[in-house]
């Protein structure tokens, strides 16, 4: 797969709790870019991400990740995933959390320090995670995803609960990672984060509503901001 | 087991160490219970000698069952399990890592309670104390692997705690400790053959009361080891990489 697509999703259908969480979604994620996955809560963002990292039972359709079917064992070292609520060990220190994930990934210990600097937690390595603030915990979770230097990062709402300064810093870090060749798929329900992304995928009720850059979507809808653009897209039933 | 198993065992032990109160409870409670037993039968030392050995071998089983099932349940509900399932770690690595960590904790616990019982409280068994201690460690490992497996059926910590009476108490009642199994109603006796704790108790009772052992002790040990292995395999099978 050298055609520049890190993820290819084809007619993906996922049923959760008796209803279609994803109702036949077809999309792709370009390599080396930061792609924003936007949509209101319940639109299927997390389900799509789980399908891409291979933890979601899917009804039909296919998901190719870095050229292999999602969930293939060889992908486990190349794809990193953070869940919406931070999945880290509260009773371990920041350093112990990173060391554990680094050992599972067989990553050099030096990567841990680098990952912590990237998320701005370099000074907190010795602190027990359970005593950190919510925003700090989610950054520890993010650091454990970075420690293996993955080719694809799937981040489910990594900036929730962070202050504007930290959010800006993280988005800058995402851009640097993409410049270094990594592919990032980042979900958010905050539309103003959209302009940080190279490309946007808008999900609504389990369907892909639109895709494009911020500029393209604003031009297409004639809206002033992404919130308004999103609402206009829903109203017009505009298909991607 | 690959590098991921030992890494997981080390991580679980680090988590345990961060919780000194649980460690203290794990180590002290069985010792206190054995001491209680001693003074309950202070005028009948022969009773203490007869049931002290078997009981000190069963306490670690119960304690480890509860601790392991709750630790594993936490892994499931906090989302770290889903996260681990996306990493290069096999399901067996995870379960074996847990098993090894709690086996080590169990070894410390069983050794301590044996030291207290034999040296401080003057417990006197027909068989050698080290054999009782070894069986106690084996039972503790069995308890933790059964706890791992049973945690798959709990959704909340309340449910996991209730599995202790649900899974463990019937086995304790039927294992022969309260009523010799040959005196039970035929149906209960038959049921008792299917329960692993029956063999654990049988082995401990033999060592407590007899000085020479035959194939029946070997059979008990084989059942304990076999059930432990089976619980590990079943525990690994309950972990799912993909969930609905």
Image (cartoon, coloured by chain):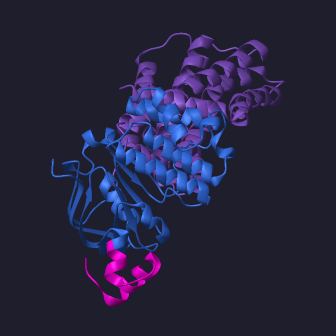
Query: Which chain, by letter, is blue?
Result: A
- Identify which residue, B1 or A135, lies in the foreground: A135
Figure check: A211 above or below B52: below
Q: Quadrant of the C terminus of chain A?
A: bottom left
Q: Residue at x 67, y 27 (%)?
A: B51
Q: Main secondary structure of the magenta part?
A: helix
Report if residue B144 lies within the magenta region: no
Residue B18 vs B188, above or below: the answer is: above
- One can see residue A178 in this view: yes
Q: Is residue A92 above or below residue B221?
A: below
Q: Nearer the viewer, residue B108 or A164?
A: A164
Query: For this rendering, which residue is in front, B2 or A143?
Result: A143
Colour of chain B, in one word, is purple
Q: Position of residue A141 (x, y in %)?
A: 52, 46
Q: Please tell me how many numbered marks the rendered image carries.
A: 0
- Measured as percent of width and height from the top left, residue B48 is found at 73, 24
User: Which residue shows up at 45% across the image and 32% down it?
Assistant: A102
- Residue A238 picture location, percent across and down: 28, 84
Based on the picture, tell me whether residue A226 belongs to the magenta stretch. yes
Q: Percent x, y for residue A196?
A: 44, 61
Can residue B239 be seen at all in this image of the molecule?
Answer: no
Magenta part of the chain: A216-240
Q: Which residue is at the front of the view, A150 or A178?
A: A178
């Amino acid at each position: 797969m050298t055609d520049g697509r890190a993820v290819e999703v084809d007619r993906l259908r996922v049923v959760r709790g008796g209803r279609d969480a994803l109702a036949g979604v077809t999309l792709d994620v370009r390599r080396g870019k930061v792609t924003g996955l936007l949509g209101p809560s319940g639109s299927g963002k997390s389900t799509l991400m789980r399908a891409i990292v291979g933890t979601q039972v899917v009804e039909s359709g296919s998901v190719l990740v870095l050229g292999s079917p999602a969930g293939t064992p060889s992908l486990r070292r190349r794809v990193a995933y953070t869940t919406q609520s931070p999945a880290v060990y509260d009773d371990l220190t920041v350093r112990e959390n990173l060391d554990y994930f680094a050992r599972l990934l067989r990553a050099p210990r030096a990567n841990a320090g680098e990952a912590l600097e990237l998320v701005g937690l370099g000074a907190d390595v010795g602190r027990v995670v359970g005593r950190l603030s919510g925003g700090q915990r989610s950054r520890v979770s993010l650091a454990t995803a970075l420690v293996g230097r993955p080719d694809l990062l799937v981040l489910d709402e990594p900036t929730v609960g962070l202050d504007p300064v930290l959010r800006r810093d993280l988005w800058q870090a995402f851009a640097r990672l993409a410049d270094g060749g990594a592919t990032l798929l980042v979900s958010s329900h905050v539309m103003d984060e959209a302009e940080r992304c190279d490309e946007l995928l808008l999900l609504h009720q389990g369907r892909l509503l639109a895709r494009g850059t911020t500029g393209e979507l604003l031009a297409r809808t004639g809206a002033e901001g992404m919130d308004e653009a999103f609402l206009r897209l829903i109203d017009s039933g505009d298909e991607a | 087991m690959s590098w991921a198993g030992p890494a997981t065992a080390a991580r679980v032990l680090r988590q345990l160490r961060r919780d000194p109160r649980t460690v203290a409870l794990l180590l002290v409670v069985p010792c206190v219970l054995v001491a209680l037993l001693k003074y309950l039968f202070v005028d009948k030392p022969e009773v203490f000698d007869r049931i002290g050995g078997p009981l000190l071998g069963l306490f670690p089983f119960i304690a480890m069952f509860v601790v392991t099932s709750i630790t594993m349940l936490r892994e499931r509900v906090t989302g770290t399990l889903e996260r681990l399932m996306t990493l290069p770690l096999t399901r067996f690595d995870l379960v074996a890592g847990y098993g090894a960590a709690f086996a080590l904790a169990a070894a410390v616990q069983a050794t301590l309670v044996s030291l207290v019982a034999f040296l401080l409280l003057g417990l006197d068994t027909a068989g050698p104390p080290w054999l009782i201690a070894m069986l106690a460690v084996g039972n503790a490992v069995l308890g933790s692997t059964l706890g791992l497996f049973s945690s798959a059926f709990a959704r909340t910590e309340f449910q996991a705690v209730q599995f202790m009476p649900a899974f463990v108490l019937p086995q304790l009642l039927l294992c022969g400790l309260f009523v010799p199994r040959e005196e039970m109603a035929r149906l209960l006796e038959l049921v008792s053959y299917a329960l692993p704790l029956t063999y654990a108790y049988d082995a401990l009772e033999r060592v407590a009361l007899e000085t020479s052992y035959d194939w029946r002790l070997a059979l008990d040990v084989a059942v304990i080891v076999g059930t432990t292995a089976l619980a590990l395999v079943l525990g690994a099978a309950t972990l799912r990489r993909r969930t609905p």
